[in-house]
Amino acid sequence: MEFLPRTLLYYMLSHGYLYGALLRHTKKRRLALAAFPFFLVMGLYPYIHDLLPDGSAAQKLFARAGTVWQPLALFCLLTVLTRDMGILCGRLGRGRSPRTPLSPAARRNLLVLLLACAGLYAYGLHEAHDLKVRRLELPLLASDGPERLRLVFAADLHIGPQTGTPFLRRFVEAVNAQAPDLVLLGGDILDDSVQGTTADRDALRQLRSRLGVFAVLGNHDAFGGHERARAFVDSCGIRVLSDELLPLGPLTLLGIDDPDVRAQKGNTDVDVAALVAGRPSAAPVVLLTHRPNLLPDSVGHFALQLSGHTHGGQIGLVEPLLVRAYGTPTGLSRHRSTAGESLLYVTTGVGFSKLPIRLGAPPEIVVIDLVPSAAASRP
């Protein structure tokens, strides 16, 4: 199995810090020592989950335990870090030894801070599972085409023990309820090296649309090996597009590999203009690619690009930094070049990675009704 060093560091160091705090603050040393195997196992949680027999009772029980413990562990980690930093800064600011007890007023202030953090964290857990349906109408079809073509777009499912199969089933139900003509998944279907369980596969197989379900792979799909990720997605009845142009009646779908997938394949950069030039008709091109940056010399050669990757920052205050990094905002934006005009939609995504919370960036599926250009005003 291929595991990222940073993933190992995240789980092991966070649980190591928590265990160190337990040792510091408990007088029952035997109890703390007895808890060591638990912290070790949970520090290796995603890997042990992946090693258990797929679909077995042991894996399901372990996944259920993890979906309860991991968000709690993160909150405990943030709490302990906040407490330790507050104590250290307060004592150093007063020129006292770090071992000097806090005053009653300082303890009250710290308690208020921790309670506020607990409330914010609880809301973040709620928002992370409060799936929204966002609707757009875009006049991109030819005037002699169908009156309406409904796309449902979603990205960043991050299927794994943190998100859980029940949330995945809710996602599938929400998509099917829109009666889509076409379902598009914009990468990071899997989370890191976790390759999906039988229950996850069964849930995704329930996606329904008239023209089919299509996907591209993202960077997290590549972390465990793009071939294994593709095998899982294929087994769900979802077609993966890899630098591939696909005519679908009134539109043409173009799926582009993520740079991490491309690097594993040893491929060079893709030329969107060249790919589009080979399409058999003048149908508008919908470009599906995981990352929200605009590919070189691509603007004007496609009608609409659909991307994810950023999660809208997952915490809304981070979103301006992502705009600076990628040059494109979350949501719908318009871009022009000498070749023409293109629209880009960047979704906040469905799941989450590492942090099991969202604040100001709720998860979403995007329902896009394409209509003839003469049937609606331009967005």
Image (cartoon, grey):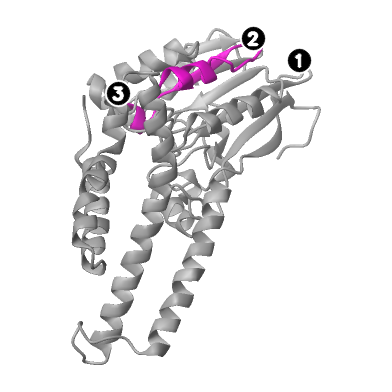
In the displayed structure, would residue 89 be above or below residue 266? below
**Magenta segment range?**
196-221
Closer to the N terminus: mark 3 or mark 2?
Answer: 3
Tag count = 3
Instruction: Residue lying at the far right in this picture: please name it.
Output: 375
The local crowd at label 2, few if under 14, some if 14 to 19, many if 20 or more residues have their Cα within 10 Å, is few
Quadrant of residue 363 within the rendered picture? top right
Task: Assess whether residue 18 is covered by the magenta stretch.
Answer: no
x then y, percent, for residue 94 = 26, 92
x then y, percent, for residue 320 = 47, 57
Instruction: Residue lying at the far top in this picture: please name it.
Output: 280
In the displayed structure, would residue 122 be above or below residue 378? below
Return the mark for residue 329.
Answer: none
Residue beneath label 3, please?
Answer: 52
The local crowd at label 1, few if under 14, some if 14 to 19, many if 20 or more residues have their Cα within 10 Å, is few
Q: Amino acid at mark 1?
A: Pro
Give SS at disc 2: loop
Return the mark for residue 249.
Answer: 2
Is any atom of residue 257 visible in this view? no
Give SS at disc 1: loop
Q: Nearer the viewer, mark 3 or mark 2?
A: 3
